[in-house]
Image (tube, rainbow, N blue to C red):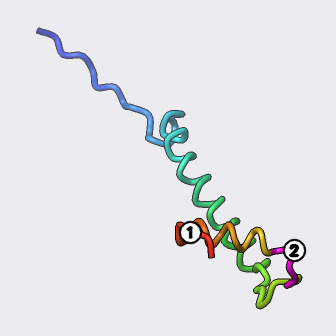
C-alpha cells in the first residue's frame, strides 16, 4: 500500500474562522475599556437635595409610600 505524502497545513493565523472567533471577544474587551473611560471621565453629579421641595411632589411621595408599605398614610 502506497502512503500519501504529508501535507503541510497552513498556520493558524491564516484561517478566517480563527479571526472570526477571536474578534468577538476582542471587540467586547475594547468596548468595555471605552465604557470605563467614559464613566471615569464623566461622573454623574451627586444630588444632595431635590431641586424642588414643595407640595407638587406630594402625589409621587404618596404613591411611593403606598407601594413600599401597602397602605396610605
Direction bottom: furthest residue: 48
Find residue 21 and report its horizontal and vertical position in percent: 49, 41
Residue density around tag 2, few if under 14, some if 14–19, many if 20 or more, within 10 Å: few
At a point 58% along the width and 65% down the height, the residue shown is 67
What is the quadrant of residue 32 in the picture? bottom right
Find residue 41 and report its horizontal and vertical position in percent: 77, 79
Viewed as shown, does residue 70 lie left or right of 59? left
Label ID, residue 2:
none
Find residue 59 and report its horizontal and vertical position in percent: 77, 69
Direction left: furthest residue: 1
Label ID, residue 56:
2
The mark that comes first in sequence, 1 or 2, is: 2
Q: Main secondary structure of the magenta part?
A: helix
Residue density around tag 1, few if under 14, some if 14–19, many if 20 or more, within 10 Å: few
Of the 4 image quadrants, the one containing the C terminus is: bottom right
On whether residue 56 falls in the magenta region, the answer is yes
Label ID, residue 71:
1
The region drawn magenta spans 53-57
On whether residue 40 falls in the magenta region, the answer is no
Viewed as shown, does residue 4 lie left or right of 17? left
Find the distance from the CA under tag 1 to the CA under tag 2.
21 Å
Amino acid at each position: 500500500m502506497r502512503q500519501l505524502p504529508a501535507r503541510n497545513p497552513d498556520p493558524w493565523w491564516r484561517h478566517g474562522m480563527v479571526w472570526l472567533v477571536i474578534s468577538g471577544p476582542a471587540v467586547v474587551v475594547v468596548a468595555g475599556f471605552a465604557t470605563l473611560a467614559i464613566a471615569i471621565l464623566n461622573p454623574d453629579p451627586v444630588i444632595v437635595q431635590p431641586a424642588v421641595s414643595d407640595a407638587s411632589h406630594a402625589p409621587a411621595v404618596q404613591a411611593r409610600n403606598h407601594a413600599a408599605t401597602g397602605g396610605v398614610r
